[in-house]
Image (tube, rainbow, N blue to C red):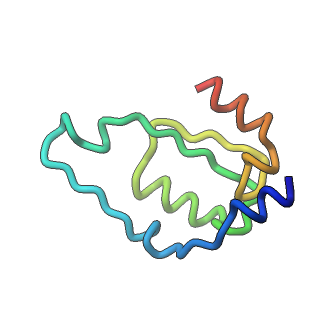
């Protein structure tokens, strides 16, 4: 798993993600028409809790679920993540 993660995970600049804006011209094509779920990672040292809360507040999802994992729950807590996704 560690070897796979080291091959797949690469640093990405945070600024484009933080500054992302979505424009829509009608409600039928609005990105807000799609139900979104935010998976909050409680042990995340990349995106701190305060930043996660700010992102949730800035663009509220339909639902927020928390997982006791680091930034990459698909590696650190895959079974818990699958259970969360299956229960949505």
Residue 18 percent across, percent down from the top left: 45, 69
Position of residue 77 in the picture relative to residue 82 (left or right): right
Position of residue 1 in the picture relative to residue 29 (left or right): right
- Total numbered labels placed on residues in the image: 0
Q: Is residue 13 above or below residue 35?
A: below
Quadrant housing residue 53: bottom right
Quadrant housing residue 51: bottom right
Residue 65 percent across, percent down from the top left: 63, 39
Residue at 56% in and 41% down: 64
23 or 8, nearer to the observer: 8
Name of the residue lying farthest toward the right: 2
Residue 37 percent across, percent down from the top left: 52, 39
Residue at 77% in and 58% down: 5
Q: Is residue 20 above or below residue 28?
A: below
Position of residue 71 in the picture relative to residue 57 (left or right): right
- Which quarter shows the C terminus? top right
Residue at 61% in and 45% down: 39
Q: Is residue 42 above or below residue 82?
A: below
Name of the residue lying farthest toward the left: 25
Quadrant housing residue 19: bottom left
Residue 28 percent across, percent down from the top left: 19, 34
């Amino acid at each position: 798993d560690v070897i796979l993660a080291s091959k797949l995970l690469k640093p990405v600049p945070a600024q484009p993600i933080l500054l992302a804006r979505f424009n829509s011209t009608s409600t039928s094509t609005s990105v807000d028409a799609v139900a979104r779920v935010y998976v909050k990672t409680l042990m995340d040292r990349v995106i701190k809790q305060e930043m996660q809360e700010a992102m949730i507040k800035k663009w509220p999802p339909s639902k927020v679920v928390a997982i006791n994992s680091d930034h990459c729950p698909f590696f650190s807590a895959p079974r818990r993540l699958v259970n969360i996704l299956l229960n949505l």
